[in-house]
Amino acid sequence: MKRPRLWIVAPHPDDECITGLLALRLQRECGFGVTVSPATLGSLRARRAARREELRAACAALGWVPWFGAAMTDDPQEKVRRLAARWRMERPDLVFLPHALDNHPTHRATHRWGAAAMDAAGGAFRAVETEYWHPLLRPNLMVAASAGDLRDLAAALSLHRGEVARNDYASRLPDWMSDNVRRGAELVGGPGAGAPKMAHATLYRARIREGGRWRAAGGGLIAGQEELARWVARFLPAVPRA
């Protein structure tokens, strides 16, 4: 039986850890393989080799596989071509990418590149949009983090040593996830909803990309493993059940 696979298109090395909670849970609880494709290695050329090695270390810590095809060119059209060619061969079950308004130029560009690659590859893609520099206006998916999930993501994130040295994303990850619970209670749960029984979470927007257009699909609150399995069965019907 083919192992289901997801791709994280990360704007920079380190974004895969910051927004990768759902990917980690799909790997551990549903048997997904995870490929991380950085869209860039950052704007500082002197740091690019180090950032590549930092990503390798972070992926090794989480059991993920890095793929640097898109990051090894600065030509946007070539990035799209390389991603599309790989996705035609591999047909990932799920693609993670930043949302279109994430307030960093490389994050917004990565959304455009990822969407264009899906269009060029053809067919329907299940996608999960992530947030960091600007909140999603309409998240539809809230995923709880266990203490172990949070610990392991923060530990992997800390391996991006150069980035953490200038801005300690790793130590701030729990606070960010805690605030996501506050926001997600009503943005995902509905106006007036009570806070769910989770301390930390990440917000996403699950959608389908087909024919150059987005359509909504696949939302909900995911706390335990059973809820995650139900979400997979509903949003990713082609994925075999464990």
Image (cartoon, rainbow, N blue to C red):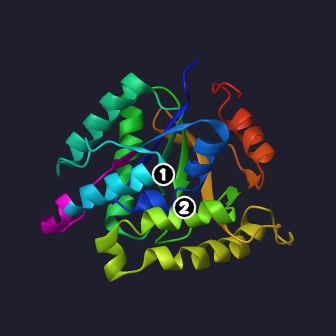
In this rendering, position of residue 212 left or right of residue 56: right
Quadrant containing the C terminus in the rendered view: top right
In this rendering, position of residue 35 left or right of residue 216: left
Q: Which residue is mark 2?
A: 152
- Cβ–Cβ under 8 Å for marks 1 and 2: yes
Q: Is residue 182 above or below residue 96?
A: below
Instruction: Please state the horizontal and vertical placement of residue 15, each as a whole percent of the image.
Output: 42, 61
Pointer 1 local density, CA inside 10 Å: few below 14, some 14–19, many at least 20: some
Q: Indicate which disc, 1 or 2, sits on the residue closer to the N terminus.
A: 1
Of the pair 186 and 160, the residue shown nearer to us? 160
Residue depicted at 40% across the width and 51% down the height: 59
Pointer 2 local density, CA inside 10 Å: few below 14, some 14–19, many at least 20: some
User: Element under label 1?
Assistant: helix
Of the pair 236 and 2, the residue shown nearer to us? 2
Of the pair 37 and 156, the residue shown nearer to us? 156
Q: Is residue 12 above or below residue 215?
A: below
